[in-house]
Image (cartoon, coloured by chain):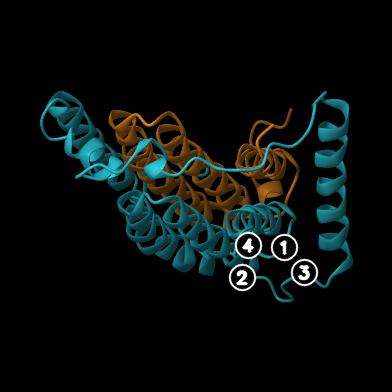
Chain colours: A cyan, B orange
Amino acid sequence: MTYLVLSLGVCFVLGGLAVASNPSPYYGVVGLVVASVVGCGWLLSLGVSFVSLVLFMVYLGGMLVVFVYSVSLAADLFPAGWGEWPVVGYSAGLVLALAVGLGVGSFEGWKFGVNTVDSGGVVSVRLDFSGVAMFYSWGAGMFLVAGWGLLLALFVVLELVRGLSRGAIRAV
Amino acid sequence: MSLTHLSFYSAFALSSLGLAFHRTHLISALLCLESMMLSMYIALSIWPIENQAPSFTLMPMLMLTFSACEAGTGLAMLVASTRTHGSDHLHNLNLLQC
């Protein structure tokens, strides 16, 4: 239990490695789901529950669901999982690149220990709740900008997938 | 380096390497982009905890919002190019021929 946060961090890196090594997209989404679940657990054990649940709902429940059914466009006859030699070679090469980068960079030693939410003392309202609540009071301008950006992205997507003669990406 | 910093830093580096290298499908590159966004979200969430500054908790929320916009746009381009080329293989996107 002492090393819970450390082991969640290691699993996060393994999930990222599972996406970056080149499996079939069916398996890449699995790595991304594992990484986001472990990341949520990491944030929960540090104490910021609101931010963690927002990640679960928006990222895992919104964006990844859309990615999962978009993966159906990428149909391989023989999907390459993590037992195939090209994928194993990719992941070994990526780990080697990371290890070389860590070895070349100068560091004194690893610092253990994390700061959690209650490191500075217990407050009546949790850190992330009070912080995000500022979005609706002092951050009202940014709220409007973000809403406008989302509306704009909706129309961008509608224009990109229009598909008739006025579509954005056509063969010449 | 703190070990938690090393975790999301190396996840970001691995995902960006995965984005840079040649792969068969366009959606694999989009998945690597999503993994980069995830590690950035974790990093931006851990930073206000370490500095005990509540108002910076807003940053990962906004980042997630705009990353959702970007993911939607990327998938729309994936759909449009699959409709044109028949599959999302990257070697089909060779109109520039450089």
Q: Amino acid at mark 3?
A: Trp
Q: Secondary structure at mark 1?
A: loop
Find disc 2 in the rendering and name its residue.
Answer: A75
Instruction: Measure how far apart labels 3 and 4 are at the Cα level.
Output: 10 Å
Chain letter, disc 4 residue: A
Q: Amino acid at mark 1?
A: Pro
Q: Cβ–Cβ below 8 Å for labels 1 and 2?
A: no
Q: Amino acid at mark 2?
A: Ala
Along the polypeptide, which appears first: circle 1 or circle 3? 1
Along the polypeptide, which appears first: circle 4 or circle 2? 4
Find disc 1 in the rendering and name its residue.
Answer: A23
Chain letter, disc 3 residue: A
Image vertical order of residue A150 relative to residue A64, above or below = above
Residue extending furthest toward the front = A121
- Residue A166 makes an appearance in the image: no
Along the polypeptide, which appears first: circle 1 or circle 2? 1
Q: Residue at x 46, y 60 (%)?
A: A67
Along the polypeptide, which appears first: circle 3 or circle 2? 2
**Marker disc for residue A82:** 3
Residue A71 left/right relative to B73: right
Q: Secondary structure at mark 4?
A: helix
Between A61 and B8, the one lying in front of the other is: B8
Q: Position of residue A33 (x, y in %)?
A: 53, 64
Chain letter, disc 1 residue: A
Find disc 4 in the rendering and name its residue.
Answer: A28
